[in-house]
Image (cartoon, rainbow, N blue to C red):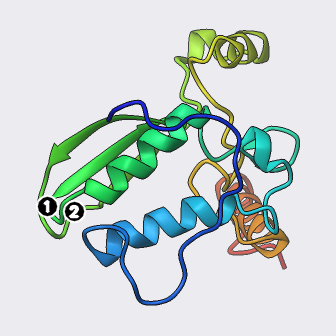
Amino acid sequence: MSDAVSGIRRVTAPRGTTLSCRGWPQEAALRLLMNNLDPEVARDPDHLIVYGGRGKAARTWTAFDQIVGALRELGSSETLLIQSGKPVGVFPTHEDAPRVLIANANVVPRWATDEIFWDLEARGLTMYGQMTAGSWIYIGTQGILQGTYETLASLARLEFGAEDLT
């Protein structure tokens, strides 16, 4: 994962049936990432912010370039690991394993305060991915509403024994 071209630029996902990766699963992940940063989708694409005030798709432009490079080279029996918007490794797996695993904004509970988290982000050590930006699956308001509904429905089941929110 070498340092590629870094810095602000316009991102547009590839379209059509031509692959820019080594397989369609990798291509799907690449297109999801890039589509989230398309100026027609992203709130502040220059700063990698997909929606909300801070929900980012990648930690930095350098990390974005490294992710894109890794996805383009990723084999069909490998998995790319992303830690808070930065690629940290490619591991041999198998064809049925996920091509990408993403873990965003994980902080050990003892230090999981807003003050510590934002300090870590300011130092480039983590990234706030919000609900869907950091996992490259932002599809607009409907996705946020659905995710919020699912969160509240889980809470209703757990705390009140309710099957749903009706």
Task: Say few, some or many: other residues with alpha carbon within 10 Å of mark 2 (under 14 / 14 to 19 / 20 or more).
Answer: few
Q: Are marks 2 and 1 in contact (CB under 8 Å)?
A: yes
Tell me which corner region of the image, top left, top right, bottom left or bottom right, holds residue 77. Answer: bottom left
Residue 25 location, x and y as percent? Answer: 34, 72
Residue 134 drawn at (x, y percent) = 61, 47
Asked if residue 66 shows in the view, the reply is yes
- Using the numbered discs, state the Cα–Cα distance from disc 2 to disc 1 in whole angstroms: 7 Å
Residue 137 makes an appearance in the image = no
Q: In the rendered image, which quarter is residue 141 located in? A: bottom right
Residue 67 is left or right of residue 158, and the answer is left
Q: Residue at x 50, y 89 (%)?
A: 16
View extreme (bottom): residue: 17
Q: Looking at the picture, which amino acid does disc 1 mark?
A: Ser
In front of the other: 98 or 17: 17
The residue tagged 2 is 97
Query: Which residue is identified by label 1?
Result: 77
